[in-house]
Amino acid sequence: LSERLNSAWSALKDEDDLSVENISLPLKDIRRALLEADVSLPVVRRFIKSVEEKSIGVKVTKGVSASQQLTKVVADELCELMGGFGGDKLIFRKEGEGPTVILMAGLQGVGKTTACGKLALFLKAQGKQSLLVATDVYRPAAIDQLKKLGEQIDVPVFELGTDFSPPDIARSGVEKAKLENFDVVIVDTAGRLQVDEMLMAELLATKAATRADETLLVVDAMTGQEAASLTAAFNDAVGITGAVLTKMDGDTRGGAALSVREVSGKPIKFIGSGEKLDALEPFFPERMTTRILGMGDVVSLVERAQVAVKEEQANLMRDKILSATFDFNDFLSQLEMMGKMGGMGGLTKMMPGMNTMSDKELQDAEKSLSVAKSLIMSMTPRERQFPDLLVAGSSAASRRGRVVEGSGRSDKDLANLIVMFGSMRVKMQSLSAQMNGTAKEVGLV
Ligand code: GDP
Ligand code: MG
């Protein structure tokens, strides 16, 4: 996939901005690539559309190619799509509310029974004691299978043979767990080769009988295109709270992850990556993104380049300070940088010797950011360059009046800005003297 993208995207080489024209070809390729990774067609369509919306107009960071930049947008979007739901966090009942009930649902052979054992072991490592409940009454071998897994990890298995209905068995299991103070009940259910009404009705009844906290859809990562319709069927009929993606150790790109997530809106909580019981991992959207796209290096390159550009701006500002020609233009570009970099705090941390402003000063400064910006925008270039024009001289008052009117702010706002700017400039100048001194000391100038 990444090879294909690299070649098709070389067309994007020397562009400054991503635009409708220059991304259309690469996006066609992404589309094909996602389909090859087994993401379902409607999901791919929606995804491409949103990448399109997000990438048009994006500036290409210095030092990276436009195609790499687009890759970053695609990767971020994928990551956002698959994450942002608190990841693997299971919903546990509060103390005193009885055991948390987790229902494992899915088609036959996807790895439900195995996942039950894996999850019990995973929870055991967190100090939670589980009771496994066998409700696959259609295949006696499935009950034995769960019992064997339970023995391996020393977790008890509750079963009533094959003479009772799954909801009844599950209900009895939960009763037992309540009496014996288990933390979690994990219910293994039967699967069919295809989605059918019987399966769904039985699952729904089991869910109701156990008042399950989690209904996890177990999906084989090799499922491919059908992952989307499968997820929709289970989610519509039973209502899932998340998914477990199994057999990720196989030769699959994991496109099913994207389909499941997109179709159900529910998080993938775990991935299974082997037949052994310890082969269960929490789901990390970043890792899955890298797997689907196969281009982690490119993404981190773009990230590094973005950091470097920020540093470059900070260095420019430092030069300004060193030469002590600090005017409203610098002030404004500082404000803009602050917005981008998480506020005054983030900026001052990047500027050597500037972490001397008090928290109160920082807060006040941030509050007046937008006011300050609108005022400065209403100044003439000369006023921005020579701030004293607004304070001294015969035209100062009329200049101030014009700025206030043009910005829609008040006289007091402008007065505050001038005071803030003044104190900032004084700081800059003393800092400048200090830094020049230091620079001389260490022989830089
Ligand atoms: P069920 O019918 O949904 O309960 O599926 P099982 O738990 O019985 O698993 C079916 C087969 O898939 C078994 O041979 C498992 O060992 C295997 N299996 C389950 N999970 C994984 C996994 O994450 N990776 C691999 N390679 N095999 C798995
Ligand atoms: Mg099974």
Image: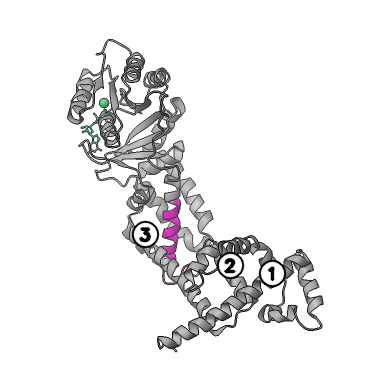
Q: Secondary structure at mark 2?
A: helix
Asked if residue 212 can be seen in this view, the reply is yes
Image quarter (top left, top right, bottom left or bottom right) of the N terminus: bottom left
Query: Where residue 285 sits in the image (x, y, percent)?
Result: 38, 48
Which of labels 2 and 3 is toward the front? 2
Instruction: Pick whichever, 221 or 403, lies toward us.
Output: 403
Q: Marks 2/3: CA distance?
A: 35 Å
Q: Nearer the viewer, mark 2 or mark 1?
A: 1
In this rendering, is residue 81 above or below 349?
Answer: above
Q: Which residues are magenta?
A: 59-77
Check the image and name the residue furthest to the top.
163
The answer to if 370 sits in the magenta stretch is no
Give neighbour class at mark 3: few <14, some 14-19, many 20+ (Cα, 10 Å). some
Q: Which residue position holds label 3?
A: 5
Residue at 58% across / 63% down in the picture? 362
Q: CA distance from mark 2 to mark 1?
A: 16 Å
Identify which amino acid the numbered label 1 is placed on.
Leu
- Residue 64 screen position, x and y as percent: 41, 69
Q: Is residue 386 left or right of residue 362?
A: right
Residue on which the image places disc 1: 417
Q: Which residue is mark 2?
A: 336
C-alpha gap between disc 1 and disc 3: 50 Å
How crowded pointer 1 is (Cα within 10 Å; few <14, some 14-19, many 20+) is rated as many
The C terminus lies in quadrant? bottom left
- Residue at disc 3, CB closer than 8 Å to ligand 1: no
Sequence-first disc among 2 and 1? 2
